[in-house]
Image (cartoon, grey):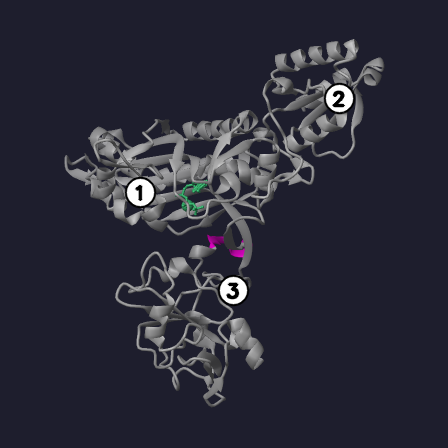
Amino acid sequence: MRYSEFGLTTLKESPAEAEIVSHQLMLRAGLIRRLTSGIFTWMPIGLRVLRKVENVVREEMNRAGAHELLMPAVQPAELWQETGRWDQYGDLLLRIRDRHERDFCFGPTHEEVITDIARRELKSYKQLPLNWYQIQTKFRDEIRPRFGVMRSREFIMKDAYSFDLDAEGLAASYQRMYDAYSAVFERLGLTFRIVDADSGEIGGSRSQEFHVLADSGEDAIAYCDADGYASNIESAATLPPEGERPAPSKDREKVSTPGVRSIEALCEHLGVEATATLKTLIVEGTDGPVALVLRGDHELNAVKAQKLDGVAAPLTMADPGTIRSATGAEPGFAGPIGLDIPVYFDHATAAMADFVVGANEADMHYTGVNFGRDIEAAETVDLRNVVEGDTTPGGKGTLSITRGIEVGHIFQLGTKYSESLGATVLNKDGKQQVLEMGCYGIGITRIVGAAIEQNHDDKGIIWPDPLAPFNVVIVPINLQRSDAVREASEALYAELQELGYEVLFDDRDARPGVKFADAELLGIPHRLVVSDRGLEEGELEYRHRRDSESKNLKREEALKLLTK
Ligand code: ATP
Ligand code: MG
């Protein structure tokens, strides 16, 4: 491709809206342009990268025996009402009304549509196992679109759906997708980790996520290489502490804590560690508010909390009015003593003695509080996020925490959708049997951002070879004024294309420094410089994007380097 022909503009400065490096570089390199919040155009070079991702995914899906189809993006409300998700899916669902006042949504996912196809097309166990997939645009009205294409509202997903007669078949189909996903991310040259995951509102039993590891990742991952454990922190379980509860050694005292509403302020005011305090969070419940009590330094895990009996999902913090009527005090002074609403205590609180809690009275806390004496020693539950150093759920090792970007997610759905939509086939005995389903998603557009998070330097993107929009960039020096350079560059451009390379020919009338900077920003793996001086020696200047120095090489040698 000739640079001068496709109207690309690169930016020197990062646009202010871009918080993380991949978003900055995608805008600077002109891969994407924002239309409105969370909605982007893929410009020609960006689209080349996107197609590479798609092709690798498509090849591996086909290799795994899945069949590509293309479902509609717009879906009728009736189907979503049949599964109950028209109401459950909430504000993420973009709802649309047609001229006849009929309700539709722009598909955020396609379980309903695929199961509708299955209930019509699949009649017999002989048609199984089956896996249908598509690569298609989804829309989710994300509350906080950010990080460019990583959390956008409109995005492209590869979604696959497997159909089996029984749980054993489903397990095998799931394993095939697990292997195919592993192959995809290996081929793309990304460093990734497979972790246990929460099944979220899609439902079902087993589920795992594929994460590209990056410090900017929105997800925290808990892992322990020693015992092969890895889980999204959302679903990483904590264990109750071992051994006896420590005995009280202090008397309970009510202390004045004027204006002290946070754990941090409390610790400073009383000169205690956060580990010696309890925090009491009031959340909305299905039948009035509920209190969740954690050790002061621990973080509430929303996914775990919203699964508890009586706690509303999605987890919602109670408003100040509710807190006042539930605790009798201003927000910031809640505590479990004398609280007249359901209370859940986190496991970690079971190991505590002589701690500080809110007194349910403005500007007051209790110190020296103990279970058994001041608060009934209730059963504890798993409420918090794991932290570095926690014991693994298997009890054999300790956890480390790293960050990741979720690029793929595989689920064993079971019969959740086939049952509500009535998707059955005749089994060997001639009886109707409900289909076992799996669903499998890959964030095609998110992968491009994730790849950049993992592969860049201060000059720009460094594409892994399988993702590079071009393999080679030709940078001619003085192209507009030197016939020798023009002839040699054109010949090189033609020859490299003939050899099957994807070549960017920087034929612009621009200073070499500008061209070099753009080639680096765009992250093209191989760069060949054609100059009068080089040509006199029969040489080209070669540099790999990862190298810090260029080499002058005979033309043949340079071409040989590319084939390597
Ligand atoms: P997240 O937890 O990041 O919101 P999710 O678990 O809701 O994602 P899935 O329903 O598992 O997403 O969708 C499959 C894949 O689609 C995800 O693994 C992710 O790679 C991609 N994806 C989901 N939401 C978005 C989004 N808003 N923008 C870009 N890609 C997305
Ligand atoms: Mg997911």
Hey, what amino acid is under mark 3? Answer: Asp
Tag of residue 529: 2
Residue at image coords 67%, 14%:
493
Hey, what amino acid is under mark 1? Answer: Glu
User: Answer yes or no: do the residues labelled 3 and 2 have beta carbons within 8 Å?
Assistant: no
The answer to whether one can see residue 462 in this image is yes
How far is disc 3 from disc 2 in space, using C-alphas? 54 Å
Question: Is 8 situated above or below 219?
Answer: above
Circle 1 crowding by C-alpha within 10 Å: few under 14, some 14–19, many from 20? few
Residue 42 screen position, x and y as percent: 51, 29
Tag of residue 390: 3
How far is disc 1 from disc 2 in space, using C-alphas? 58 Å
The mark closer to the camera, 3 or 1, is 3
Residue beneath disc 1: 168
Question: Is 505 situated above or below 334?
Answer: above
Which secondary structure lies at badge 1? helix
- Closest to the observer, 99 or 190: 99
Q: Please report whichever mark, 3 or 1, sits nearer to the chain's N-terminal start.
A: 1
Residue 46 screen position, x and y as percent: 55, 29
Task: State which region is magenta.
Answer: 225-232
Residue 285 is left or right of residue 373, and the answer is left
Residue 334 is left or right of residue 217, and the answer is left
Q: Is residue 228 magenta?
A: yes
How far is disc 3 from disc 1 in space, using C-alphas? 34 Å
Q: Please report whichever mark, 3 or 2, sits nearer to the chain's N-terminal start.
A: 3
Residue at image coords 38%, 29%:
65
